[in-house]
Image (cartoon, helix red, strand yellow):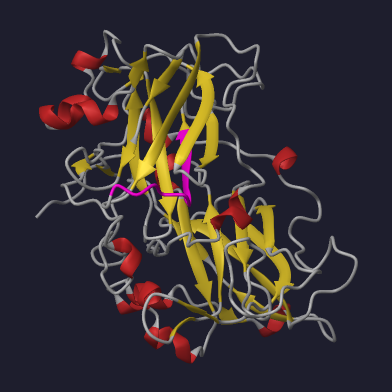
Amino acid sequence: MSDVVGYRRPYFNTQPSYLYPGYRSTIKRAPTRPLVLLPHTLSETTGPVFGVDDVGPADHDLTAGHPGQPLGERIVVSGRLLDENARPVPGALIEMWQANAAGRYAHAIDDHDAPLDPNFTGCGRVLTDADGNYRFLTIKPGAYPWRNHYNAWRPAHIHFSLFGVGLVQRLVTQMYFPGDPLLAYDPMYNSVPDDMARRRLIADFDWERTIPDIALAYRFDIVLRGRDETPMATKRS
Amino acid sequence: MSLLTTPSQTVGPYLKIGFTALAVDAIAPAGAAGEHLTIEGRVVDGDGKPVNDAVLEIWQADAGGKYVHAEDANASRSGKFRGFGRILTDAAGAFRFTTVKPGAVPGLNGTMQAPHLVVTVFMRGLLKHLLTRIYFPDDPGNAGDPVLLLVPADRRATLVAKRSPAKATLQWNLVLQGENETVFFDF
């Protein structure tokens, strides 16, 4: 059988390192032995395929499914899923989860002294359409304190989990909001060394997708790893 | 056009909210062909403490060595076996799942890879996920597996499950740091 075409390695400084002591939990969880460089085989260029049976028709709407409306500012979060070669990734599964408007997660271990919202669970799922587009309707999550260091606060964020075509495209990330003063103080956000790469984690305010009288909107395009082009006569220096 | 991959960020401590809906601890349906197995173990951190907030995602071929994916030219789609598992660790850092032993799958340059599971690991404290593999004890293909051969010989055992004589299960632990630190791949 012919060899598979692998995916490009991440560009210098555009991904965080495993060990980032400013985020304390990395200290006892980051690998300490050298990683083994893995060539991409069929085991890495294939990956799980999801479909309409995995996603409910209302799973994109986090404001629905409860007796009443959740508290907070309703927002549309939408964008495109692309690869590094700027090709859309259609039919891809996107999962997301977040805190409520008061900065509290509907999770047993979240003991932040802020109210739970009986009308908000905070998780959603969608499949991208044929052009890689996705769209969620939710509420803007609140900032919340955490125990990483004295007076530590997480900037408002939404967790995203993405499955591409191949397993090595798998990505979990967080979307932040423009103009948030807490970003400057956040070790997770600042764990990405490259400034331009880091800023790609911040959504754009998206006037065109606002819903009059209903919701404001943010745009968050997500890029997964791209495939090496089939080896051709490329110039080498 | 050349875009750059979005940076990875940790799943954080509240990943169960997002990951529970598609959790799968029975990877192969009851009727799937092949040797049915239970694999169990624990995830421990650099202090040897159990990690109670980890997620392992498993990706594997079926018993015939075919991935249920368009890029596996040899794959036949039965529709019943997806080859994907997602297992959340419990309060003791333990995990357990059932599956069938995959067949050997093609490697690079005409080689074959011994049966293996690809394991993707997410947890609080990992700014990007880890990738490792589980191989099967006593499989004759292990000795010549092109990926195991990339691993320093004294660390290969961390990638091979152990047969538990007392129980009809395979044991495999994920050790994040220390003497028996699991081998992780730069992928």
Image: A218 above or below A180: above
Residue A173, x across and y down, in percent: 47, 62
Q: Residue furthest left?
A: A237
Residue in view at x 39 percent, y 32 percent: B118
How far from the left and from the top, in percent, is residue A112?
Answer: 58, 76
**Residue B82 drawn at (x, y percent):** 58, 27
Does B53 lie within the magenta span? yes
- In the rendered structure, the answer to whether residue A77 lies left or right of residue B113 reads right
Give the quadrant of the N terminus of chain B: bottom left
Seen at 48% across and 18% down, the residue is B66
Note whether B106 is above or below B14 in the view shown: above
> Residue B169 lies in magenta, yes or no?
no
Specify the segment rendered in magenta: B48-58
For the C terminus of chain B, the image quarter is top left
- Residue A16 position, x and y percent, is 31, 65
On screen, residue B108 versus residue B50, left or right, reads left
Q: Residue at x 67, y 46 (%)?
A: B21
- In the rendered image, the vertical position of residue A125 relative to residue B138, given as above or below: below
